[in-house]
Image (cartoon, rainbow, N blue to C red):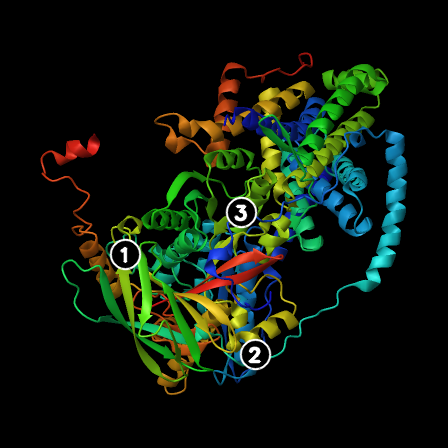
Amino acid sequence: MRQRSLVILTSVLATGALTLTACGSRDDSGDKSNSGSSTTFTIGVDAPLSGENSTTGLGIQYGVQVAVDDANKNNWVPGVKFKVEALDDKAQPATGQQNATKLVGDKNVVGAVGPLNSGVAQSMQQVFASANMVEISPSNTNPELTQGKNWQTAKKRPYKTYFRTATTDELQGSFAADYAYNGLKKKKAFVVDDKQTYGAGLAKIFAEKFKGLGGTVVQTDHVNTGDKDFGSLVTKIKNSGADLLYYGGQYDESSLITKQLKGAGVKIPLFGGDGMYATTYIDVAGAAAAGDLVTSVGVPVDTLPAAKQFIETYKAKGYKGDYGAYGGYSYDAATAIIKAVKAVKDANGGKVPSDINDLRSKVVDEVQKSDFQGITGKVSFDQYGDTGNKQLTVYQVENGEWKAVKTGTAS
Amino acid sequence: MSGIGPVEPVGSAGSGDGRDVIGADAPRLTDRWPAVSPRVRRNALGAGVIAAVTAVALLAPQAGSPDHARPPEPMPYPANVTDWHYLGLGAPLGSRATAGSFRFDVSVDSGPPVTLTVLDAAFPGLVAHATPRPAFTVPAGTTRRVTVEISVSDCSGLPPNADLPFLDVTLRNTRAIQHHSFIFGGAYARDLSTLFHRACNRSPARSAPRPSGSAGSQNADRA
Amino acid sequence: MNTLPQQLANGLLLGSMYGLIAIGYTMVYGIVQLINFAHGEIFMTGAFGALTVYLYILPDGTPMAAAVPLMLVGGAIVSVLIAVGAERFAYRPLRGAPRLAPLITAIGLSLALQEAVRNFYPNADKALAFPGLDTTHDIGSITIKDADIFLIVSAIICMSALAWFVRKSRTGRAMQATAQDPDTAQLMGIDTNRIIVIAFAIGGFFAAVAALAFGLKYGSIDYRMGFLMGLKAFTAAVLGGIGNIYGAMLGGVVLGIAETLASAYINNIPGMQQLGGQSWANVWAFVLLILVLLFRPQGLLGERVADRA
């Protein structure tokens, strides 16, 4: 009896463990040809690939995949092939840190793209910095990541290995506040965030800018990621007389909030940031999403002629996730790393440095010098590692689709 | 997701009032149904299994027919090719100035010519228009110098400082009409803030809200 | 506008859902002293079972009044089968093993079920839309949806039926006997294995009812929904007195109302702004649990079974 129970216990645990690891490894695709004549380097990807935020996270993974496939197909770096190693951080900072450690420890990895969440990025920056390995996030928008804790008063770059192709929430929050106040003529906002680095930061900036324009923030509240029942919050919003709900966070919670809000008869739009810009938001919220708004980084990918090929490839391959928010930026981030490898190789007399640490640190320097026309526009980085391409778009849900209603460029 | 079409004017972006009522089409639920007896449930179960088999048989063949063939769009959207660059004030602001002229370089990288219309300066108390003409066209590959006249009409609608001020512009070329904001930091923000202070007789905002006198100020703040 | 009635209604609804799930924990614990941590996942699979019926079996455009009972059937089949299967293949072989063994099995089973749904259900790696019952009704200052009516009505019906079943029916009394002393019950001719299976099945059915209500109310389900709801329901069961079916329901309602009121009003108390709001609801729920356990370790109602040797 005892033996039998032990067998069953272990088998159940093994099943659980195996299914878990299966998810981690199933994403390894890409070019594995490691013939003698060419070297293969790995570009790491870290993003939430399952569960919460995975719609946008998968968009990052496959955006990088398309870039790597293009690089291999077109032989961007002669004699060098690339492959993708995608790790799932489940939007958890601790998991992100483990993944970063894993990538740094792999001597084939030249650089990493990711993560999706600013809060996860905070835990990964140090790991990449100490290994002198480049990390480019296509989606982190929290200003602190590049400009330091005191970005409002004294900007100071904390890590020279960290770059991003998305612009910051300082712009995004201002842009949203301007559209809410001047575009939508909303005067009373109820501001909610999910207490994460990204969500709380964005909501705070929005609230400041909205008040700066003359609007009132009637009340603020916070939710937990993973919450499902927002009945109490909805009743508070209903009672507050707000004419706009601003939400700093991801689509997982906000799609439920808008559904429960409209369900309770509160017909005010929900306005959020780039973390909410995903098709899943509309899929889940259904008709309740109509009229809701987001700001997102960049201009709509499908208005970019250079991105046409990218979108076609993405769709033709049947990749999961939504490329809309960050797919193009992920492509450009991966391209920046690939181009940096090429620049290092060219500067080294046509040979890739044999020491991986040497290569990594040179790649960081070359990424800093990036200046090329990517599919989302010009790719370059300023002295903080922030993108030179500071564009934003307001999208509104119309007939079950995100529709661009206004764009903005910062200079 | 389709491309962005002609953009609706900003005023009509909607207050959300006219939006759909969710679930308006959902059928009413009677209170009767949870009280289904086990026998009925068993029958329903049988029916469900039969229905399942039928439905799978019927639905399986008509799985997915992809439909993403969009015509090529070689022409760039105007927002992606237009650049604004702040040059400086057209003339120094007087000590009681209520208006200023701000000079910009506008350039278009590629594609068809872009026609620009300056709408406003993003604060309710400001009126902005480009001189000499409110709408002007910039062909690709050229740079045009534009002066935007911004005047203060209502101090109550202005924040103490303009930080990241916007310039709202409509961009139009043969591809699309886009409503676009150009967002400026640096010199433009400083110059615009100076205009606010002069026009509204405020001293620079940093010291304005503080009560004067250092010894009493802490108490004053607490009160 | 006075929001208290609405907030109480919100709490009552949330609490009924906790209560329905808590029944599964409390019945299983009452009879085999096992905390079935996979019960949250049984709840989750019930929701997916109901969604499967809606998406793949019912023709498009089926009126919801007809669809909901069929979805309940689908959800119940899945939940009950998984609950009974778990008992038969995972827990029964471990009966008599040290208590830690079935507990760890339950956790493993819970992970396995989550990952199975995530990997094998179409598109289940993200949240799936669930048909909602969103028509609203205003009763005084309270606004409720059809889904809320479904939840409260089915909770009342299920609870009354269970109370009758346990007290009056032959099987129910056999169940009480088994809970009191399984060995003696067996000597008295009660097939305890059958009783245990029935307890798991009832728990699974109640979880399916709660899962359907969850889907109809919130309009979206995902493979991780069982974790937090299961944890809350377990809390509710402990709060009410684990092993006691009335306690489970009471615990659920108390927990739901406490959470809702805490999130609604605590930040209005001067000096407590930092400790209120939605994000602190869980904290206050557990503060309440600790307080109750401090003064009534057996829970609000306590376990109704007699002392165990």
- Amino acid carrying label 3: it is Ser
The chain that hosts pointer 2 is B
Q: How far apart are marks 1 and 2 (CA)?
A: 38 Å
**Residue A403 on image: x %, y %:** 55, 61
Residue at 52 percent of width and 45 percent of height: A268
On screen, C60 above or below A369?
above
Circles 3 and 2 on the same subunit: no
On screen, C109 above or below B61?
above
- Front-lying residue, A251 or B221: B221
Q: Is mark 1 on a helix, strand or loop?
A: loop
Callout in the foreground (1, 2): 1
Q: Is residue B107 visible?
A: yes
- Amino acid carrying label 2: it is Glu
Report the quarter where the N terminus of chain A lies.
Answer: top right
Residue at 48 percent of width and 45 percent of height: A245
Q: What element carries label 3?
A: helix
**In the rendering, which numbered label is found on residue B162?**
1
**In the rendering, which numbered label is found on residue B73?**
2
- Front-lying residue, A221 or C283: A221
Q: What element carries label 2?
A: loop
Callout in the foreground (3, 2): 2
- Residue B129 picture quarter: bottom left
- Residue A1 left/right relative to B188: right
Name the residue carrying label 3: A254
Report the quarter where the C terminus of chain A lies.
Answer: bottom left
- Residue C73 picture quarter: top right
